[in-house]
Image: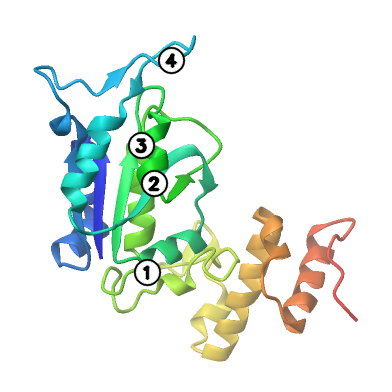
Amino acid sequence: MRIDIATLFPELCETWLGASIIGRAREAGVFELHCHQIRDYAEGKHQRVDDTPYSERQGMLMMAEPIYQCYKAVAGDRKPYVVFMSPKGKILNQEKCLELSKKSDLFILCGHYEGVDQRVLDKIVDEEISIGDFVLTGGELPAVVLVDGIARMLDGTLGKDVSHEDESLFDGLLEYPQYTRPEVWEGMPVPEVLLSGHRENVLKWRRYKKLEETYKKRPDLLEKAELDDVDKANLSEISAILDENPKWISSP
């Protein structure tokens, strides 16, 4: 997979995406990443990339031409899937990360200042993505979040004994609690089932705890999660334990 990021601050993206697990995966060739300075494609002595908008709104707007020239130079004869990081876009989730991880060629555009000339967005962008209902000073942090979320889905990024399929949100539920040594810390023991070595019981415990965590912290996710009769029965029990007025009633 190849990922290109067009930005006014490529060093910010390089710093984060060159470190830790993602950096090692990049170095190992799991995916290819290039960060491009949009200003390099601007005309004139001062390589200007922004101008005042045609409106009464204050601030500066990124011009279409430098972005378009950057895109053309990077894409060449290829047609990458183009994502613009924008608070107007759909909220990023695990499903979207998985979907984009299957693209072979991704071009991510980072805006700055008060935004980007709409014409270049109309010409090259396939999708706008947001990381939340708030506004940042630029698209670099959202782009890094997106790449991190995508790259860890790729085969070879995580260790052999680690799977993204067992993490929060992959199956629509939050991840179960996890524990490590010592067995007792500050008077709090590791759950006995995890010390038992009984795999079937451990798997049942994990599923129950995923339901419990989701019910407590993100009950909205349960509306779309695929639940069987055992899950529904467990949710009825969880609801009865946690709530004075249980919200979850299992099907008869």
Left or right: 182 in relation to 132: left
The amino acid sitting under disc 1 is Lys
Foreground tag (1 vs 4): 4
How far across and how far down the image is residue 137, in percent?
A: 38, 27
Closest to the observer, 10 or 74: 74
Marks 3 and 1, Cα distance to the nearest angstrom? 25 Å
Label 2 Cα neighbours within 10 Å, binned few <14 / some 14-19 / many ≥20: some
How far across and how far down the image is residue 142, in percent?
A: 39, 42
The amino acid sitting under disc 3 is Val
In the drawing, what numbered circle is on residue 125? 2
In the drawing, what numbered circle is on residue 120? 3
The first of marks 3 and 1 along the sequence is 1
Residue in the picture at 39% in, 34% down: 119
Q: Which residue is mark 4?
A: 54
- Contact, CB < 8 Å: mark 3 with mark 1? no
Marks 4 and 2, Cα distance to the nearest angstrom? 22 Å
Q: Quadrant of residue 16?
A: top left
Marks 1 and 4, Cα distance to the nearest angstrom? 39 Å
Q: Secondary structure at mark 2?
A: loop
Judge whether residue 72 can be spotted in this image: yes
Location of the C terminus by quadrant is bottom right
Question: Compared with residue 126, is residue 171 higher up or lower down, i.e. above or below?
Answer: below
The amino acid sitting under disc 4 is Tyr
Question: Compared with residue 24, is residue 9 higher up or lower down, i.e. above or below?
Answer: above
In the drawing, what numbered circle is on residue 102? 1
